[in-house]
Amino acid sequence: MKVLLIILILFPNIVFAGPVKMIGEKGKASETTRTITIKMYDNYYEPAQIQIKKGETIKFIVFNAGELVHEFNIATKEMHIKHQPEMMMMVENEILLSNRIDKEKMKKMAKKNPSMSHSHSNSVLLSPGEKGELVWKFNNKVKLEAACNVPGHYEVGMIAKINEI
Ligand SMILES: [Cu+2]
């Protein structure tokens, strides 16, 4: 226990950067091998299955065609579950409204609490009608899923399975 605590204090990056590398990394746009268009509806993705090959860098063009705010987040199931309280906090602080993201408030809150900036390289959070892009390099070390962590959406199955082919 004591040893773990010392490791956490001395090397926080080892502990926290680890899982992120496990899921792959932010890709370079110049290394994109394929583009996949994802449409987000209330509350599902189209397509609901994504096929990837090891080492591929994919550019995802994500469009929110629904009437609610949605997220496209590439992570493991465990990471999604851990991310959900953070999203709930955004709802409680009225940054994340059901059909809109209060970006001004998000900026102000981010100064106090960096986790509220919601700028993770593995996710895009979009208001209805908005379009976003995410370039991801897959290394296929762990099982991944793309999911929406807006409160209630993951629970009703707003998940796109990522399968290695
Ligand atoms: Cu959603």
Image (spheres, grey):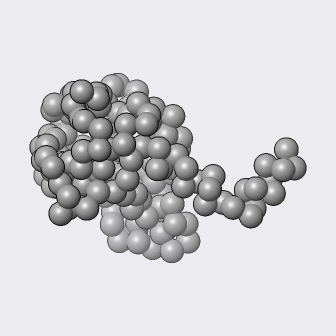
If the image is split into quadrants, where does the C terminus sit? top left
Q: Residue at left 76%, top 56%?
A: 7
If the image is split into quadrants, where does the N terminus sit? top right
Residue 158's place in the image compared with 105, above or below, is: above
Count of marks overlaid on the render: 0
Q: Residue at left 55%, top 66%?
A: 113
Q: As drawn, is 112 to the left or to the right of 98?
A: right
Residue 86's place in the image compared with 13, above or below, is: above
Q: As drawn, is 163 to the left or to the right of 13?
A: left
* Residue 129 visible, this angle: yes
Q: Residue at left 33%, top 25%?
A: 157
Tell which of 49 and 64 is nearer to you.
49
Q: Residue at left 13%, top 46%?
A: 34
Q: As drawn, is 143 to the left or to the right of 8?
A: left
* Residue 149 visible, this angle: no
Residue 89 at x, y percent in the picture: 51, 51
* Quarter residue 135 falls in: bottom left
Tell which of 96 and 70 is nearer to you.
70
Q: As drawn, is 145 to the left or to the right of 52?
A: right
Residue 4 at x, y percent in the picture: 79, 49
* Quarter residue 132 falls in: bottom left
Tell which of 31 and 37 is nearer to you.
31
Residue 84 at x, y percent in the picture: 48, 41
Residue 59's place in the image compared with 113, above or below, is: above
Residue 162 at x, y percent in the picture: 29, 31
* Quarter residue 10 falls in: bottom right
